Every structure is written in C-alpha cells, then in structure tokens.
Amino acid sequence: MTSTHAFGIDFGGTGIKGAPVDLVKGDFSAERVRIKTPSKSTPKNVAEVFVELLAAFPDSTGPVGVTVPGVVRHGVVRTAANIDEEWIGTDADKLFSQATGREVHVVNDADAAGLAEVRYGAARDQRGLVIVTTLGTGIGTALVYDGVLIPNSELGHLEIDGHDAERRAANSAREREDLSWSHWAKRLQTYYRALENLFAPDLFVVGGGVSKQSAQFLPLLDLDTDIVPAQLLNDAGAVGAALYASEQS
C-alpha cells in the first residue's frame, strides 16, 4: 500500500523531511527521512534534495505534496520571507514535477498544518470556521471552513496597535524579549481577540513548537471562542501536504 500513498515533504529552514502518508490514518506509512536543507536553498537546489529524498522510497508512486514557507497561488510561489528570493515567481509545481518525475503540488506550510489538524487532529469533525495558528519565528495561519481550505490567509501580518502582529506575539518575540508567560499571554489575548472580532470562528487551534507548553499560556486567555493546542505537532506539515496533493490529483 505504501506505493500508492501520497507522499508528504515538509521543507524547512534547517531540514527537509518526508515520508509516504496513510491518508486514512493521517500518519506516516514508513519511517520519515530527514535531509539537511542546502545552505543556499534555491528552488533548483531544493529540487535536488527532493529527488534524493524520494529515492529513499523506491516503491512510492503516489502524488507528492510539499510545504513552502510563503504564499502559493496555483503552484506558483509569490512570497519568500524566510527563504531564497529566487523562489518568488517560481512555478514550483512544474519545477518539482519535472525534477522528480512525479506529480507534485506545493502548499503554504501553515495551510498544510491546518488541513492536517482539521482532518486528523485537534479540529477533527469540527464544523464551521477553524483558524489554525502556528506560533514560531512568525505567526502562520490557516482558515478552513467545513473542511475546505481558504488559502494564503497570512493573518500573522495583521496590524495591531501599530505593529505587525507576529513581531509582537510570535513565540520568537517571547524569546527575544524574555517575556514571562503571563506577559506574552496578554499579547496573545490582543491578537486572538482581533481575529475573533474579524472572523467569529468556531475554533482556534494553536500549533508551532511552543504548543507543547500550551498549559503555560492558553488558560490565561479569555476568549469567546474555544482555543486548543494542535495535536500533530511536527508531523502536521508533511501529513497536510500529502493530503493536499491527493486532493489536487
């Protein structure tokens, strides 16, 4: 069965991780492989890593989904905040499909995590609007309505109190400014209340590495909307990318 499973690749700043994904279970069907991200992470160099990664799974033939930390429209990367500028304007679907000889579909990394959490994780069976946020170097967001992704929301860039929200409320801001959990929670309160006022969601899901410590800050928030930690953690990107690729095929 591994041969027909969709393949998920999570492209990050330090590592590129991938494995075939059982989309019934929402889990890897073989042990994940990780390869170091090239120091110059141009699309061409990253494509070469994808070829190497897929070669580790010679029986895999399903569609391939890839996360990218940027806005993606119809397979074309439109922004590159934390990756090489050569990505901007690249038809990544076409480039990676040609390089690997496989059907490849690229998706924003936060959108991939959102899809995974809605289908298999903390928002499973949740109707209505789910907003998934990833608190890390920045704030990634995904909007999913009744299981359908509304792509490229980029709500980490909302202007709040004259500041880009992620500059104040991302986990990197907490670490950079050495904020206490309670101080940081006040900033998160302002951010999530703004999202609540704009979108009236049915559920917030909080991901990113700091979600493992959600007991330190989520109980400090006072919102009208339920807010819960993500469940898939580091697997969400690859699982969501594989799900996305299967639905685009």
Image (tube, helix red, strand yellow):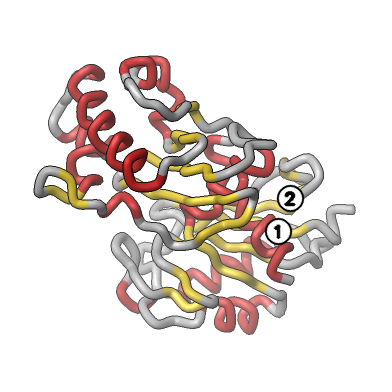
Q: CA distance from mark 2 to mark 1?
A: 6 Å
Under mark 1, the amino acid is Phe
Quadrant hosting residue 178: top left
Q: Which mark is residue 55?
A: none
Where in the figure is residue 217, as x and y percent of width and height?
Answer: 33, 20
Could you tell me which residue is drawn at 75 percent across and 59 percent down?
6
Could you tell me which residue is drawn at 73 percent across and 63 percent down?
246
Could you tell me which residue is drawn at 69 percent across and 37 percent down?
125
Does residue 74 appear left or right of residue 172 in this picture? right
Query: Considering the numbered disc 1 on the image, is that residue within a helix, a strand or a loop?
Result: strand
Density class for disc 1 (Cα within 10 Å; few <14, some 14-19, many ≥20) is many
Under mark 2, the amino acid is Val
Q: Is residue 35 visible?
A: no
Where in the figure is residue 151, as x and y percent of width and height?
Answer: 49, 62
Density class for disc 2 (Cα within 10 Å; few <14, some 14-19, many ≥20) is many
Does residue 221 appear left or right of residue 73 in this picture? left
Q: Which mark is residue 7?
A: 1
Residue at the disc numbered 2: 21
Closer to the camera in the image, 193 or 16: 193
Q: Earlier in the sequence, mark 2 or mark 1?
A: 1
